[in-house]
């Protein structure tokens, strides 16, 4: 029992040992050889982003911390910021993004579940701050979406910028499917904003005359943009069926609703707003897809233009090959990660290697998938 308690403590602290390092593996489809090594131990690294100079920032889901790692791999002792965060179940410190003009303005954005008070509900909150000497300054809340039903699940909660500089925010349905189809509520949607000095402004040509970009989502955990087309791709966590990979277009409806029946790739009709768009991939049994990223680096030329995503249930990393128009899928391959698992976020670093977050009974870590002969 004492060993179990010690392991649980180490997991919380992100200090438990991880499995064997520097595993050399091969992508059987392309013959590409790569290695997986531990980059650093980390406490539930749920969101990661690299600055142009190679500095890595990551969120710790359970602590409310944003952490900073120098380009030479040194973790700053103090967090950049610690936000009062409710981390029960799927709540917590979730999304993280850098301003498109970060090199000049040093602005950062984070999504977290703000603690409630005696007079206020917990709320998924978008916070902006400026990085100054490794710490947060000029901290401000840009948007707060109260969890008025008290539910702990389906927070979604990620933030990214597209190539045009617009801010996108994903929110789960707060475990209430009626939210996903209601144009008067924010949960269950992906939103698009223009960022100003004063805050957020819905983009003028958004399809519903408000912040909503697309609707009908249950729990869009993460999303990314195709560097070639600027199309948005999201991982969507379903119920006991139909986990999805979706390509998201403005105004379309992605089908989650109160009377949802597990339908796989079958069209959904009778939706009040928008046209249903069929998922690119649908998984039953479910996998709980999480982090997602496109690869455009030179370290693995065979994978250039491919889409990668991971899942919580099995820790599998998948490589998705798109067709020439980049709107449909040609093939999907499971990546061999050896004894490691990609459970949460997935990003490509300035060295063109993959960095992915993992947690489990061994603790938490950020792993690196890199060329063998680098």
Image (spheres, grey):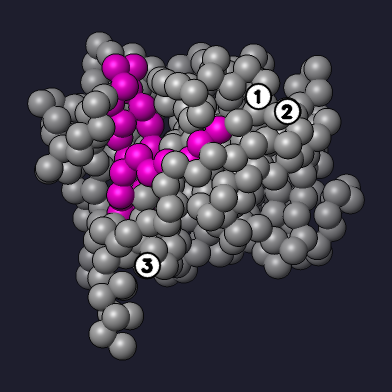
Residue named by callout 3: 88
The stretch drawn in magenta includes residue 128? no
Q: CA distance from mark 1 to mark 2?
A: 9 Å
Q: Which residues are magenta?
A: 34-58
Q: CA distance from mark 1 to mark 3?
A: 37 Å
Q: Quadrant of residue 200?
A: top left
Classed neighbour count for the residue bearing mark 1: other residues with Cα under 10 Å, few (<14), some (14–19), many (≥20)? some
Q: Nearer the viewer, mark 3 or mark 2?
A: 2
The stretch drawn in magenta includes residue 52? yes
Dot 1 or dot 3: first in sequence order is: 3
Residue named by callout 2: 30
- Say which residue appears at 49% left-offset and 23% top-offset: 373
The location of residue 199, given as percent across then percent down, is: 32, 28
Dot 3 or dot 2: first in sequence order is: 2
Q: Nearer the viewer, mark 1 or mark 2?
A: 2
Classed neighbour count for the residue bearing mark 3: other residues with Cα under 10 Å, few (<14), some (14–19), many (≥20)? few
The location of residue 185, given as percent across then percent down, is: 53, 49
The location of residue 281, given as percent across then percent down, is: 77, 44
Is residue 331 shown left or right of residue 98?
Answer: right
Q: CA distance from mark 3 to mark 2?
A: 42 Å
Q: Nearer the viewer, mark 1 or mark 3?
A: 1
Check the image and report above or below for 58 versus 285. above
Is residue 29 shown left or right of residue 83?
Answer: right
Between 229 and 144, the residue placed more toward the observer is: 229
Q: Which mark is residue 303?
A: 1
Q: Is residue 54 visible?
A: yes
């Amino acid at each position: 029992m004492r060993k179990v308690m010690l392991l649980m403590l180490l997991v919380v602290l992100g200090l438990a040992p991880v499995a064997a390092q520097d595993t050399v593996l091969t992508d059987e489809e392309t013959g590409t050889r790569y290695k997986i090594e531990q980059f650093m131990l980390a406490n539930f690294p749920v969101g990661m982003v690299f600055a142009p100079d190679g500095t890595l920032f990551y969120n710790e889901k359970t602590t409310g911390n944003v952490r900073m790692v120098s380009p030479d791999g040194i973790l700053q002792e103090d967090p950049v910021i610690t936000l009062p965060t409710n981390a029960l179940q799927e709540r917590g410190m979730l999304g993280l993004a850098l301003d498109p003009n970060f090199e000049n303005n040093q602005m950062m954005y984070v999504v977290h579940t703000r603690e409630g008070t005696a007079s206020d509900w917990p709320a998924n909150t978008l916070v902006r701050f400026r990085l100054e000497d490794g710490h947060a300054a000029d901290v401000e809340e840009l948007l707060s979406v109260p969890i008025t039903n008290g539910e702990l699940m389906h927070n979604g909660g990620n933030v990214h910028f597209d190539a045009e500089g617009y801010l996108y925010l994903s929110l789960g349905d707060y475990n209430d499917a009626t939210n996903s189809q209601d144009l008067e509520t924010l949960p269950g949607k992906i939103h698009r904003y223009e960022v100003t000095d004063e805050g957020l402004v819905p983009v003028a040509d958004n399809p519903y005359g408000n912040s909503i970009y697309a609707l009908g989502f249950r729990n869009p955990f993460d999303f990314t943009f195709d560097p070639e087309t600027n199309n948005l791709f999201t991982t969507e966590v379903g119920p006991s069926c139909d986990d999805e990979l979706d390509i998201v277009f403005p105004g379309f409806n992605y089908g989650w609703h109160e009377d949802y029946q597990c339908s796989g790739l079958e069209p959904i009709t009778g939706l009040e707003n928008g046209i249903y768009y069929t998922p690119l991939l649908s998984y039953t049994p479910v996998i709980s897809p999480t982090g997602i990223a496109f690869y455009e680096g030179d370290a693995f030329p065979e994978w250039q233009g491919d889409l990668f995503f991971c899942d919580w249930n099995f820790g599998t990393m998948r490589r998705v090959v798109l067709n020439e128009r980049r709107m449909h899928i040609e093939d999907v391959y499971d990546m061999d990660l050896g004894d490691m698992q990609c459970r949460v976020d997935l990003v490509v670093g300035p060295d063109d290697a993959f960095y992915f977050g993992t947690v489990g009974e061994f603790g938490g870590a950020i792993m690196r998938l890199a060329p063998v002969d680098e």
